[in-house]
Image (cartoon, rainbow, N blue to C red):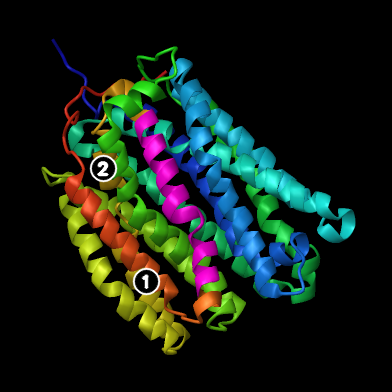
Amino acid sequence: MTMLTDFDRPARAGLTRMVAAIVVGNGFIAYDFTIYSLSAVTIGTLFFPSRNPVSSLLLSLATFGAGFVMRPLGAAIIGHISDSRSRKTGMMLSLMLMTIATWMIACMPTYASIGPAATVLMVVARLMQGLAAGGEIGPASASLMEAVAHERRCFIVSWRGASQGMAAFTAALIAASTTALLSPATMQEWGWRIPFMIGGLIGPAGWYLRRRMPAIAEQSSRKLMFRPLFAEHARTLVYGVLMMAAPSASFYVAVFYLPSYLVQTLHWPATISLVTACLSGLIILVMTPLVAVIADRYASRKTVQYVMFSVSLMATYPAFRMLTQGVGHIGGLLIMAAYVALSLNNAGAGSVLMLEAFPRHQRAAGLSVIYSLGVVIFGGFSPLLVTWLIHLTGDTMMPAWYLIGATATTLYALNRFPENRYARVATSGVSAD
């Protein structure tokens, strides 16, 4: 009998289409979250007006965080659709919801035009984005992991994480370009809408690619599997959520919050601060697959993560101390680039470790719950929390203290998290259709 391998030409063609569809779609969803964060100051002024600029920013960041509250619900609803119909159907639904919400923000009248209705509509759009994002990660990651052999899983799954770097890079580049080319008055009037409109155009492209995704041999259940999931894997879920502390906090502080922090707290020029986010996204895009290749070479999925999180823990305080002491723009960019390279490139090994802790029929749901709850607890509200703590205490080192606590939590949970429980379960394969 001749056995087909991962390197058969039809299978490779199908895998390439799958990776492209998931990368573009997941990147689009991450792009919209990034653009909102980078526009937080302007959106706060236009949709959450207040006599105190800090209050406007806090309300804008609170709305940013509100989108994350919907992620667990999205994980349940879209995760169920992914199980009962297909993962492809669930991922297409999440993309459609994100596209609608993005166009809502791009075309939405401001508070000055329609009053409090503008605030309500902005919150509704953010909740829709959260619902969409919650249902994306689990099915997308599980589809990638099950399409290849055990020895290549970290690398293939890492492209979902790399897509977030691509999204952050693209979003920051577009935001920096519009900020540099348009006057502050023009940006305030209509220029801030341009990045959202560009994002709205990416949505249909992602939809087309996902429509052409190859079929995956799945064993779907018609019943919602979350009750047995919690009953059978409570310990795994708890430690998985805690493992999300460092990745979530680092991403949403270093990529989403840092531009506002550099402008509002350290008084950097807006364009330079956006270059920081752009550089962070580029590093994530390039480094995540490279780190995943290394992780695939080790028997343990934990080895590379232990090393990188430990070094990141030790580097956090010196990095932010130098930033707050005024090392200059070039020095600051280099410091943040080094920090991001250490702390934000474990998506491949981390996701695969979590996916392999669940049986195949609970795999997508398990990662969806872990990711959604972890991001809600440690990531989504971190910009709001850090901003509030700086305002309360006057300590500009608050981002460092928060990241140190999050990284220590992750290292503890990583040590406790079960490994290789279902690592050798057969892959589903990709149809070349």
User: Which of the two residues, 218 or 81, is positioned nearer the viewer here?
Assistant: 81
In the displayed structure, would residue 381 be above or below residue 338? above
Extent of the magenta region: 365-389
Q: Tell me if I can see residue 147 in this picture.
A: no
Q: Is residue 383 left or right of residue 285?
A: right
Q: Is residue 321 left or right of residue 275?
A: left
Tell me if residue 41 is in the magenta stretch. no
In the displayed structure, would residue 74 be above or below residue 253? above
Mark 1, mark 2: which one is toward the viewer?
1
**Residue that appears at 35% across and 50% down:** 244
In the displayed structure, would residue 184 be above or below residue 431? below
Q: Quadrant of residue 63?
A: bottom right
Q: Which residue is mark 2?
A: 154
Residue closest to the far top: 1
N-terminal of the pair, mark 1 or mark 2, is 2
Amino acid on which the number 2 mark rests in the picture: Cys
Where residue 206 appears, as percent x and y from the top left, is 56, 37
- Label the magenta part by its dominant secondary structure: helix
User: Which of the two residues, 304 or 177, is positioned nearer the viewer here?
Assistant: 304
**Residue that appears at 30% across and 49% down:** 243
Label 1 Cα neighbours within 10 Å, binned few <14 / some 14-19 / many ≥20: some
Amino acid on which the number 1 mark rests in the picture: Trp
